[in-house]
Image (tube, grey):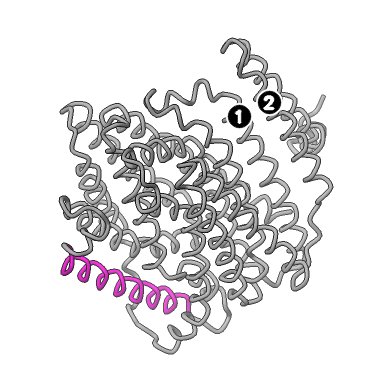
Amino acid sequence: MGKLTAIFKDTAIYGLSSIIGRFLNYLLVPLYTAQLSAASGGYGVITNIYAYVALVLVLLTFGMETTYFRFTNKTHTDSNTVYSTTLISVGTVSLLFAIVVLLFLSPISQVMGYGKHPEYVGVMAVTVAIDAFLCIPFAHLRQQKKALKFAALKLLNIIVSILLNVIYFAWLDGKDVGYAFYINLVCTVMLAACLITEYAGFRWKLDTQLLRTMLNYSWPILVLGVAGILNQTADKMLFPYIYKGEDMQTQLGIYGACSKIAMIMAMITQAFRFAYEPIVFAGVKDKGQHEMYAQAMKYFIIFTLLAFLVVVGYMDILKYIIGADYWTGLRVVPIVMAAEIMMGIYFNLSFWYKVIDKTIWGAVFSGIGCSVLLLVNIIFVPQYGFIACAWGGFAGYGVAMIISYFVGQKYYPINYPLKEIAIYLLLAFAIYEMMQKLTEWHVALSLTANTILIGIFVAYIIWRDLPLDGILRRLKIKN
């Protein structure tokens, strides 16, 4: 129970910084969608390029974040040597990537569809190369349990980014989408300077034998990561090639903007991962670990379902995050959120093959899920547009989640409280269906009714899994 408490504590820190950071970052969405109309396709450019950035970031880190956690907790390895070897390997690959892209910038930009603006590609290549290197110092902060420093730096980066974006797009009334990328580069360089203390205090050494061992562990994680990020971004990268309408950039911008509303699930999953991963690897041999996995899964599902209901229930308010000419895509929000919940469950399920060093299974599961996503997109996007992108992610994560569960129960059985989880799922689905029927009501009435329905879900959580008498006893509160 102590480890579960530690997870909740660190998740609160990571989660608060992530939620505040994402909320602040959301301020860029109304800013961009106000200055860059849907018809201009400007937000479509941002959506497309950042999809590529997400994929490249996974390639450049090649699974070394998780590998670092695994090897730094092994008894026969020196943690400083592991850290130094990880830094040097990721840094070298990132530097080579930036050099190659800059040398062949023109043909690469042409293939991506940005032949008239190669500077977009060049700036983001340098930015993502630095970001990839910084992933390791941030992983080191997590491993050292420096959650507050981690959170503070992440928030600083976002606040400076917002200020610079507001100055250009709002105060100066800028319309050039390229400045979004220039600002990103400035903030990344600033972040690298703030992390300078994480590059000192140890001997820089590349242990080639250790690196070979780490790469044997990390390459399946790389495949897993590529497949996983493609589940999130492949639709946005493929869309310009498979959707043949003249309004391609407009449609992609609408989909990208509306998907931002659904990203609260990504925030929760990310916060949970930041806290969960170091603790799991540090206690691989501890007794009671299986029970901790089961309980963590249940509470993760409970609170992501609550977040789902809150977003759906208050959609009439949250939709103002984006410009009114983007609202035609709001129907994708529940689908994308459900897909993110399944992605989070899949992440929870993934630890069985990581702790027994069988990461090849993750590559298999994610590869299958990614194949399903690509198939759905290729077949249905030409006819149905961006709504097919949302369902593709839903199908891909659903398949990967189901396969991972059944194979995991064979090799590393965990007694998940399936009956309790099923009740929460059914209750959340019933409430969601009622909310959908209430959309025809007056906005004030539907928001009031949705608040009552969310209150019912919260009351059930308190009654079933957060009994107030137990909480009061723990707090030693007397009558």
Q: Secondary structure at mark 1?
A: helix
Report whether 448 appears left or right of 28.
right
Chief SS of the magenta region: helix
Residue 126, magenta (yes or no): no
Report the amino acid beneath label 1: Val
**Magenta stretch, residue numbers:** 78-105
**Picture coordinates of residue 200 (x, y %)?**
31, 68
- Quadrant for residue 198, please give it: bottom left
Residue pointed to by mark 1 = 310
Residue appearing at x 51%, y 53% in the figure: 379
* Image marks 2 and 1: residues in contact by CB distance under 8 Å: yes
Residue 178: x percent and y percent?
Answer: 20, 44
- Whichever of labels 2 and 1 marks the residue nearer the N terminus, that label is 1
- Residue 392 spot, x, y in % from top left: 54, 50
Q: Is residue 178 above or below residue 101?
A: above
Residue placed most toward the observer, 85 or 198:
85
Vertically, is 19 above or below 191? above
What residue is rendered at 30% in x and 69% in y? Answer: 94
Disc 2 from disc 1: Cα separation: 7 Å
Q: Circle 2 — which element?
A: helix
Amino acid type shown at disc 2: Ile
Rendered image: mark on residue 32? none
- Residue at 70 percent across and 54 percent down: it is 2
Q: Quadrant of the C terminus?
A: top right
89 above or below 28?
below
Asked whether the viewer can see residue 13, the reply is no
Label annotation for residue 454: 2
Q: Is residue 98 magenta?
A: yes
